[in-house]
């Protein structure tokens, strides 16, 4: 059973993997909204460092109202790191998890060693997207959320998921309080981190799936222009969460970045990816 960090009114579950090199900085894995902690299973198995994957939805098991924003999710992570007596981590965040990762790196730069942002942006501005329309339907409660949940999970990828995996991911969403999910999304839509990007000192890798229906190339460009030490790679044939579509390539890119650190001396980009222009 996953351990739970007690928080005011609720608790945050997380999973630790100690199979990596104990001398490495631990890697904190932050899952996307409508994804779940299990999105990181293959990453945790393959990274050569200890990992900690949080379960955002576990907050909805108690009084979640004080924690229903990206800023408060970031504060929960700081409490977790303090409790575990971990002074610094590498952070990998996807989508809303990537927003929380930006908050951590900008507001607690001493706690973030290296950063990987996946399918995310500094703000949710931009033209309407197919994924954005589904998010709006969820937030407004205009459609049956139980029927929406599988569509939301499917929208995170470009190719159909294996049936068993899809069932697990959908179940994780349905087990959470839908109003909690909605409240965090509303808060995320109001947040604009562009003025804070220059405060991020961690070397940053920005990854986007070529077929991402949620975050556009413009979101990547904003991150590149705002974060001083950053570079970006587009992963072909993938959607919003490439770690579950092309885990081998995704993990190689992340591991290379975490091992080498500075963007100026980052790993050679495999020929199957496109370096951002």
Image: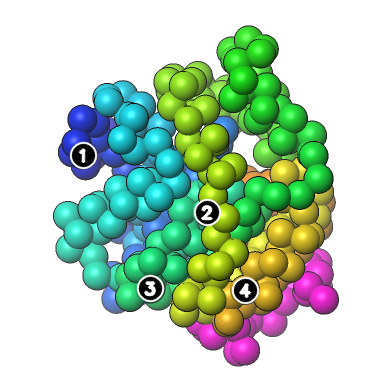
Instruction: Work out whether residue 77 or residue 252 is closer to the camera in this orientation and state it.
Output: 77
Q: Is residue 80 left or right of residue 30?
A: left
Q: Which type of secondary structure does the marked residue at label 1 adopt?
A: strand
Instruction: Say whether marks 4 and 1 touch (CB < 8 Å).
Output: no
Q: Residue 99 — which label?
A: 2
Question: In the drawing, does residue 178 fall left or right of residue 220?
Answer: left
**Of the image marks 3 and 1, the number of the one nearer the N terminus:** 1
Q: Quadrant of the C terminus?
A: bottom right
Instruction: Indicate which disc residue 7 carries.
Output: 1
Q: Which stretch appears magenta?
A: 255-277
Mark identifier at residue 226: 4
Residue labelled with disc 3: 109
Q: Distance between the residues labelled 3 and 2?
A: 15 Å
Check residue 63 in the rendering and tell me which mark sits there, or answer none. none
Within the magenta stretch, is there residue 16?
Answer: no
Real-space CA distance between mark 3 and mark 4, rounded to the nearest whole angstrom: 15 Å
Q: Nearer the viewer, residue 50 or 239?
A: 239
Sequence-wise first label, 4 or 2: 2
């Amino acid at each position: 059973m996953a351990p739970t960090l007690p928080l005011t009114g609720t608790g945050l579950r997380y999973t630790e993997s100690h199979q990596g090199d104990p001398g490495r900085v631990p890697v904190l894995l932050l899952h996307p909204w409508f994804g779940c902690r299990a999105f990181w299973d293959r990453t945790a198995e393959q990274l050569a460092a200890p990992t900690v994957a949080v379960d955002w939805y576990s907050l909805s098991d108690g009084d979640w109202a004080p924690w229903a924003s990206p800023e408060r999710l970031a504060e929960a992570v700081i409490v977790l790191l303090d409790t575990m007596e971990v002074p610094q981590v590498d952070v990998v965040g996807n989508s809303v998890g990537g927003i929380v990762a930006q908050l951590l790196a900008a507001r607690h730069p001493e706690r973030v060693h290296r950063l990987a942002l996946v399918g995310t942006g500094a703000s949710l501005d931009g033209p309407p997207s197919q994924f954005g329309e589904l998010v709006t339907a969820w937030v407004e409660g205009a459609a049956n959320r139980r029927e929406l949940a599988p569509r939301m999970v499917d929208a995170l990828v470009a190719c159909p998921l294996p049936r068993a995996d899809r069932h697990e991911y959908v179940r994780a969403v349905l087990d959470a309080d839908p109003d909690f999910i909605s409240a965090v999304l509303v808060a995320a839509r109001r947040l604009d981190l562009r003025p804070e990007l220059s405060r991020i000192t961690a070397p940053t890798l920005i990854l986007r799936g070529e077929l991402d229906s949620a975050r556009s190339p413009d979101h990547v460009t904003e991150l590149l222009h705002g974060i001083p030490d950053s570079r970006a790679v587009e992963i072909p044939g993938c959607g919003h969460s490439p770690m579950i579509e092309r885990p081998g390539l995704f993990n190689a890119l992340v591991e290379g970045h975490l091992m080498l650190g500075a963007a100026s001396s980052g790993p050679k980009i495999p020929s199957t990816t496109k370096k951002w222009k």
